[in-house]
Image (cartoon, rainbow, N blue to C red):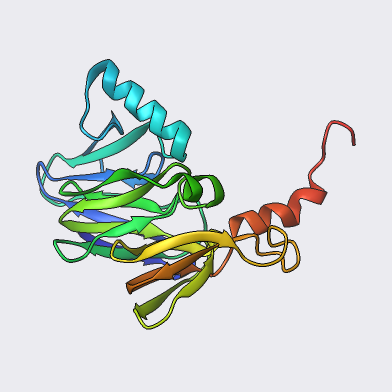
Amino acid sequence: MNYQMLGSDTFPIVQITLGAGESVQLERGAMIYHDGRVNLEGKMNSNGKTGLGGMLNAMGRSMASGEAVFMTTATGMAAGATLGIAPANPGKIIALTVDETNHWRLNTGAFLAADSTATYQMVRQKVGKALLGGTGGFFVMESVGTGTMLASAYGDLLSIDLDGRHDYVIDNNHVVAWSSSLDYHIEVASGAFGLTTGEGFVNRFTGSGRIYIQTRNVRALAELVRPFIATKND
């Protein structure tokens, strides 16, 4: 993927340059602009399945994981075609290398774009993780193929490297992406459902690999503004 980051570090956009016939996959609604030489097509996010089975597969995974039923495919109609994209959330964007030795799992809402050769599949989580975690419901995104994948965060992005010598515990709502080589378990942060410290559920990572975390928490923001939102009873 031939791309460059434009704008500030906090509120960047990605400008992608496409060759004739070259395609990238985008999160639905991510397109800001293009130069008129890009074809946009909405396709069912069905892991290769087609027809009614593909639609049911896409809808079922959407209800279980929160991912979009449709994904946008952008294709260059001429060499040098340009396309600008951005995530819905305000924050940094990171490029993840996907190849035989580097695969990633992404939290819900983190996927922004990828080469046509580097997509993701939905991997079913264990029931305990799905019910208690904030990382994709019953499914979690896992990269496949080779190429570049762009992920976005709310706020800044920091990386944590684990060498297998000890575990690392991170609030679910701050996890953006992690190496598929890492194992993780959902657990209560402390006390009765985390009520004594306010963290609720956390991810405990074990093994060797990298974790990307975001410095802000969308759920915490929602709780902050909730008292100021008018209701029918107000």
Q: Residue furthest right?
A: 234
- Tell me the quarter of the picture where residue 124 sits: top left
**Image quarter of the N terminus:** bottom left
Expressed as whole percent of the image width and height from the top left, the position of residue 192 reads 72, 60
In the picture, measured across the screen, residue 194 lies left or right of residue 129, that is right
Q: Vertical placement of 170 versus 82: above or below?
A: below
Q: Tally the numbered discs.
A: 0
Expressed as whole percent of the image width and height from the top left, the position of residue 46 reads 28, 31
- Tell me the quarter of the picture where residue 16 sits: bottom left
In the picture, measured across the screen, residue 113 lies left or right of residue 125, that is left
Tell which of 11 and 66 is nearer to you: 66
Q: Vertical placement of 191 versus 29: above or below?
A: below
**Image quarter of the C terminus:** top right
Q: Residue furthest top?
A: 52
Does the rendering let one see residue 165?
Answer: yes
Q: Residue at x 26, y 44 (%)?
A: 25
Q: Residue at x 13, y 45 (%)?
A: 22
Tell which of 158 and 2 is nearer to you: 158
Expressed as whole percent of the image width and height from the top left, the position of residue 108 reads 45, 49
Q: Residue at x 24, y 18 (%)?
A: 51
Does the rendering let one see residue 84?
Answer: no
Expressed as whole percent of the image width and height from the top left, the position of residue 159 reads 40, 75
Tell which of 3 and 164 is nearer to you: 164
- Tell me the quarter of the picture where residue 180 sits: bottom left
In the picture, measured across the screen, residue 5 lies left or right of residue 23, that is right
Q: Residue at x 49, y 70 (%)?
A: 156
